[in-house]
Amino acid sequence: MPLDFEKQAQKGNKFLKDVAEELGNKADTSNAGRMLQAVLHTLRNHLPFEENLKLLSQLPIALKGVYVHEWSPEKKRDISRKRNDFIEEVLRYADGTCLHGFSDIQKGTEAVHAVFKTLKQYISPGEFNKMEAVLPDQLKKLVRESIYSKTLTLNLASKK
Protein backbone atom coordinates (compact mmCIF):
# COMPACT_ATOMS: atom_id res chain seq x y z
CA MET A 1 0.00 0.00 0.00
CA PRO A 2 1.61 3.27 -1.09
CA LEU A 3 1.71 6.19 1.30
CA ASP A 4 -0.38 9.14 0.20
CA PHE A 5 1.03 12.06 2.15
CA GLU A 6 -1.44 14.52 0.64
CA LYS A 7 -4.37 12.42 1.85
CA GLN A 8 -2.80 12.11 5.31
CA ALA A 9 -2.22 15.86 5.48
CA GLN A 10 -5.86 16.43 4.53
CA LYS A 11 -6.99 14.20 7.40
CA GLY A 12 -4.77 16.07 9.87
CA ASN A 13 -5.97 19.45 8.59
CA LYS A 14 -9.59 18.31 8.82
CA PHE A 15 -9.06 17.32 12.46
CA LEU A 16 -7.45 20.69 13.16
CA LYS A 17 -10.30 22.60 11.48
CA ASP A 18 -12.80 20.58 13.50
CA VAL A 19 -11.05 21.63 16.73
CA ALA A 20 -11.03 25.25 15.57
CA GLU A 21 -14.73 25.04 14.75
CA GLU A 22 -15.48 23.61 18.20
CA LEU A 23 -13.73 26.69 19.57
CA GLY A 24 -15.93 29.00 17.54
CA ASN A 25 -13.43 30.18 14.93
CA LYS A 26 -12.86 27.68 12.12
CA ALA A 27 -10.31 29.99 10.50
CA ASP A 28 -8.00 30.10 13.53
CA THR A 29 -6.18 26.81 13.01
CA SER A 30 -2.96 28.21 14.46
CA ASN A 31 -4.53 28.63 17.88
CA ALA A 32 -6.39 25.34 17.55
CA GLY A 33 -3.08 23.63 16.75
CA ARG A 34 -1.43 24.98 19.89
CA MET A 35 -4.35 23.79 21.99
CA LEU A 36 -4.46 20.41 20.28
CA GLN A 37 -0.77 19.84 20.91
CA ALA A 38 -1.01 20.86 24.57
CA VAL A 39 -4.05 18.68 25.27
CA LEU A 40 -2.59 15.64 23.50
CA HIS A 41 0.71 15.98 25.34
CA THR A 42 -1.05 16.35 28.67
CA LEU A 43 -3.31 13.40 27.93
CA ARG A 44 -0.38 11.12 27.07
CA ASN A 45 1.13 11.97 30.46
CA HIS A 46 -2.00 10.62 32.15
CA LEU A 47 -2.41 7.40 30.18
CA PRO A 48 -0.57 4.13 30.72
CA PHE A 49 1.95 3.28 28.00
CA GLU A 50 -0.22 0.57 26.41
CA GLU A 51 -3.24 2.85 26.25
CA ASN A 52 -1.12 5.58 24.66
CA LEU A 53 -0.14 3.13 21.92
CA LYS A 54 -3.73 2.05 21.32
CA LEU A 55 -4.92 5.65 21.06
CA LEU A 56 -1.96 6.59 18.90
CA SER A 57 -2.74 3.78 16.46
CA GLN A 58 -6.10 5.38 15.63
CA LEU A 59 -4.93 8.94 15.06
CA PRO A 60 -4.32 10.33 11.57
CA ILE A 61 -0.61 10.09 10.68
CA ALA A 62 -0.11 13.85 10.98
CA LEU A 63 -1.47 13.79 14.54
CA LYS A 64 0.69 10.81 15.46
CA GLY A 65 3.68 13.07 14.93
CA VAL A 66 2.17 15.75 17.17
CA TYR A 67 1.35 13.15 19.83
CA VAL A 68 4.84 11.66 20.07
CA HIS A 69 6.85 14.86 19.59
CA GLU A 70 9.36 15.07 22.48
CA TRP A 71 7.71 12.13 24.26
CA SER A 72 9.81 10.17 26.73
CA PRO A 73 7.51 7.36 27.86
CA GLU A 74 10.05 6.01 30.35
CA LYS A 75 10.16 9.34 32.19
CA LYS A 76 8.16 9.20 35.43
CA ARG A 77 5.66 12.00 35.80
CA ASP A 78 4.01 13.48 38.86
CA ILE A 79 0.42 12.86 37.77
CA SER A 80 -2.47 14.58 39.48
CA ARG A 81 -5.88 13.01 39.65
CA LYS A 82 -7.68 16.36 39.79
CA ARG A 83 -9.54 18.10 37.00
CA ASN A 84 -8.07 21.58 37.42
CA ASP A 85 -4.54 20.19 37.70
CA PHE A 86 -5.01 18.53 34.30
CA ILE A 87 -6.25 21.82 32.82
CA GLU A 88 -3.40 23.77 34.41
CA GLU A 89 -0.94 21.27 32.93
CA VAL A 90 -2.46 21.96 29.52
CA LEU A 91 -2.09 25.70 30.10
CA ARG A 92 1.55 25.57 31.08
CA TYR A 93 2.63 22.92 28.62
CA ALA A 94 5.80 23.93 26.82
CA ASP A 95 6.74 26.43 29.54
CA GLY A 96 3.48 28.29 29.27
CA THR A 97 3.97 29.26 25.66
CA CYS A 98 1.88 26.56 24.06
CA LEU A 99 -1.46 28.18 24.80
CA HIS A 100 -0.58 31.82 24.42
CA GLY A 101 -3.69 33.78 25.33
CA PHE A 102 -5.33 30.93 27.20
CA SER A 103 -4.13 31.61 30.71
CA ASP A 104 -7.13 30.84 32.88
CA ILE A 105 -9.01 27.69 33.84
CA GLN A 106 -12.14 28.57 31.82
CA LYS A 107 -10.16 29.02 28.60
CA GLY A 108 -8.19 25.85 29.32
CA THR A 109 -11.42 23.96 29.93
CA GLU A 110 -12.75 25.15 26.58
CA ALA A 111 -9.59 23.93 24.87
CA VAL A 112 -9.82 20.52 26.55
CA HIS A 113 -13.51 20.22 25.66
CA ALA A 114 -12.86 21.07 22.01
CA VAL A 115 -10.08 18.52 21.63
CA PHE A 116 -11.90 15.68 23.38
CA LYS A 117 -15.11 16.35 21.49
CA THR A 118 -13.20 16.22 18.20
CA LEU A 119 -11.15 13.20 19.26
CA LYS A 120 -14.39 11.31 19.93
CA GLN A 121 -15.28 11.71 16.24
CA TYR A 122 -11.97 10.28 15.00
CA ILE A 123 -11.32 7.20 17.09
CA SER A 124 -13.46 4.13 17.57
CA PRO A 125 -16.07 4.23 20.36
CA GLY A 126 -14.40 1.21 21.98
CA GLU A 127 -10.98 2.84 22.07
CA PHE A 128 -12.41 6.13 23.31
CA ASN A 129 -14.18 4.28 26.14
CA LYS A 130 -11.00 2.36 27.04
CA MET A 131 -9.00 5.59 27.12
CA GLU A 132 -11.60 7.22 29.34
CA ALA A 133 -11.82 4.17 31.62
CA VAL A 134 -8.16 4.34 32.69
CA LEU A 135 -8.37 8.01 33.70
CA PRO A 136 -9.02 9.09 37.30
CA ASP A 137 -12.67 9.90 38.12
CA GLN A 138 -12.33 13.70 37.86
CA LEU A 139 -10.71 13.38 34.44
CA LYS A 140 -13.39 10.95 33.27
CA LYS A 141 -15.94 13.57 34.24
CA LEU A 142 -14.01 16.20 32.26
CA VAL A 143 -14.03 13.93 29.19
CA ARG A 144 -17.77 13.32 29.54
CA GLU A 145 -18.43 17.06 29.90
CA SER A 146 -16.50 17.55 26.69
CA ILE A 147 -18.38 15.08 24.56
CA TYR A 148 -21.81 16.01 25.86
CA SER A 149 -21.29 19.78 25.74
CA LYS A 150 -23.63 21.16 23.10
CA THR A 151 -23.08 24.83 23.91
CA LEU A 152 -19.29 25.03 23.71
CA THR A 153 -19.14 26.71 20.31
CA LEU A 154 -21.99 29.09 21.15
CA ASN A 155 -20.40 30.09 24.44
CA LEU A 156 -17.02 30.74 22.83
CA ALA A 157 -18.47 32.64 19.89
CA SER A 158 -20.43 34.95 22.19
CA LYS A 159 -17.24 35.87 24.12
CA LYS A 160 -15.50 37.27 21.05
Image (cartoon, rainbow, N blue to C red):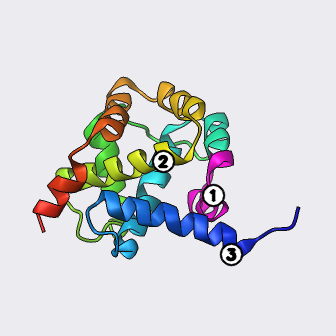
Expressed as whole percent of the image width and height from the top left, the position of residue 75 reads: 59, 47
Badge 2 crowding class, 10 Å Cα cut-off, few under 14, some 14 to 19, many 20 or more, is many
Residue 45 numbered tag: none
Q: Nearer the viewer, residue 35 or 145?
A: 145
Q: Earlier in the sequence, mark 1 or mark 3?
A: 3
Residue 6 numbered tag: 3
- The residue range painted magenta reads 56-72
Expressed as whole percent of the image width and height from the top left, the position of residue 107 reads: 21, 56
Q: Can residue 13 be seen at all in this image of the molecule?
A: yes
> Rounded to the nearest whole Å, what is the CA distance between mark 1 and mark 2?
11 Å
Expressed as whole percent of the image width and height from the top left, the position of residue 7 reads: 68, 69
The amino acid pointed to by label 2 is Leu
Expressed as whole percent of the image width and height from the top left, the position of residue 129 reads: 52, 28
Q: Earlier in the sequence, mark 3 or mark 2?
A: 3
Badge 3 crowding class, 10 Å Cα cut-off, few under 14, some 14 to 19, many 20 or more, is few
* Residue 59 falls inside the magenta stretch: yes
Q: Nearer the viewer, residue 31 or 26?
A: 26
The residue that mark 2 highlights is 119
Which residue corresponds to the image point at 29% horizontal and 60% vertical from the top-left? 23
Rendered-image quadrant of the N terminus:
bottom right
The residue that mark 1 highlights is 60
Q: Main secondary structure of the magenta part?
A: helix
